[in-house]
Image (tube, rainbow, N blue to C red):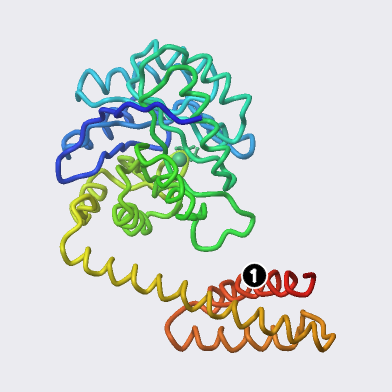
Amino acid sequence: MELELEPLQLPSDKERPIVIAGPCSAETEEQVISTAHSLAAKGCYIFRAGIWKPRTKPGGFEGNGEMALPWMKRVKEETGMMISTEVATPEHVEMALKYGMDILWIGARTTANPFAMQALADALHGIDIPVLVKNPVNPDLELWIGGLQRLNQAGLMRLGVIHRGFSSYDKKFYRNAPMWQIPIELRRRIPGLPIICDPSHIGGRRDLIAPLCQQAMDLGFDGLIVESHCSPEKAWSDAEQQVTPDILDYILSLLVVRDHTSATEGLKFLRTQIDELDNSLMGLLAKRFRICREIGTFKKEHNMTILQAGRYSEILEKRGAQASLCGMDANFAAQVFELIHEESVRQQLEIINK
Ligand code: PEP
Ligand code: MN
C-alpha cells in the first residue's frame, strides 16, 4: 500500500532545517516555562516535552501526566511556539488534543507494537494533525512502514518519521545504533516522507549532538528533534544527552546545510564518472563469471568438487589485505567477495547439473 501524504507544514527558517527542541520530560512548570522562553528567544518554533515517559524499568520518573499539560498550553500562549509530545495510548491522544497539542510523536517502543499502533490510529481517525513516527526499537523497516500505513489508513496524511537509532545488547559508541542505511532505504522507498533526526537518543551524550546533526544534514534529512533543558545536568531523565538552549543555538549556527536538490555541474560530472565505473564493474563481473563457468566445465570433466575451501579462504584473505592497503574496510571487501563467491558457486552448479 502506497502512502498518501501531505506536507507537514511545520515552521522553520530558510537556512535552517525544521527544529523541534525542548526537555526530555516536563518536570516542573518552572522548568518547562523557562526552557521554552529561552528556546523561543533563540528563534525556535517548535517545543517538545515528554508528558508520559516510557521507562525501561519501574522506579524511574514516568512523567507528570495530565498535570503537565496546562504548562505546555502556557508555552504556546506565552511564546507562540507549537507544542509537541509523545503519545502511546488512546487516552494520551485524547488528553493531548484537549490541551491543544499541535504535533504528536509516537515513541520507539510503541512503533514496535502493531496493536498499540492500531489503537493510536483508531483514536486519531479523521483528525488532521501532524504525527511523527519514531523508528521501532528494533531495526525493522517493514514494522516502521507498517505503523505509518496504519495511521495513513485512518486518514492521517501529515506524517513524518523520527530516526532515533536502534537498541542493541552490545552498547558501543552510541546509545542507539544509528544504522543510517535504514532511514536511507526508507527515503528511497517513500521519497516524499519527511525524516527528522533525533541525535539526542542516538548519541546519548551531549558531545555527539553536533556531529550527529551534521550527519543528518549531509544525508538530506529534513529536520532535527533535540533535547534541550535549562539545567541539563539536573534533568530528571536523560541528563547526559540534554543541552542548554544556548548550546543548541550554537550547534545549529555551525550546521552546514547543503543544497541537495540542485545538482551542480561538478556533481553531474562526478556522477557520470561513477556511472562509468559501475558499468566497468558490471563488465568485469560478467567476465569473471564467464571464467567461473569455464572452471565449472573443467571440474565436471575431471570429476572435482565445486567448493574448494582452501582456495576460497585464500581469496578472502588476499582481498581483505588489498582492501586495507587501498583505504577500504577489510570486512567490506570480505563481504563483497563472499557474495561474488556465492554467485560463482551457483553458476558452476548450473554447469555441473546440466
Ligand atoms: C523521547 O523522545 O524522550 C523518547 C522517550 O524517545 P524514544 O521513544 O526514542 O526512546
Ligand atoms: Mn529522552
**Which quadrant of the view contains residue 209?**
bottom left
Write the residue at 24% across / 43% down: 17
Q: Please tell me which residue lies in front, 86 or 163.
A: 163
**Which quadrant of the view contains residue 118?**
top right
Write the residue at 23% across / 37% down: 39
Q: On the rendered image, what quadrant is the C terminus found in?
A: bottom right
Q: Secondary structure at mark 1?
A: helix
Q: Is residue 3 left or right of residue 167?
A: left
Q: Please tell me which residue lies in front, 143 or 203.
A: 143
Amino acid type at circle 1 is Glu
Write the residue at 85% across / 85% down: 303
Name the residue tied to disc 1: 343
Q: Residues within 10 Å of mark 1 (few under 14, many from 20)?
A: some
Q: Is residue 111 left or right of residue 222?
A: right
Q: Is residue 156 above or below residue 142?
A: above
Q: Is residue 333 above or below residue 95?
A: below
Query: Residue 338: percent from the left, percent from the top?
Result: 63, 73
Q: Is residue 257 above or below residue 223?
A: below
Write the residue at 59% across / 89% down: 318
Query: Residue 49: percent from the left, percent from the top?
Result: 38, 31
Q: Please tell me which residue lies in front, 316 or 32.
A: 316
The answer to whether residue 37 is seen in the rendering is: no
The answer to whether residue 32 is seen in the rendering is: yes
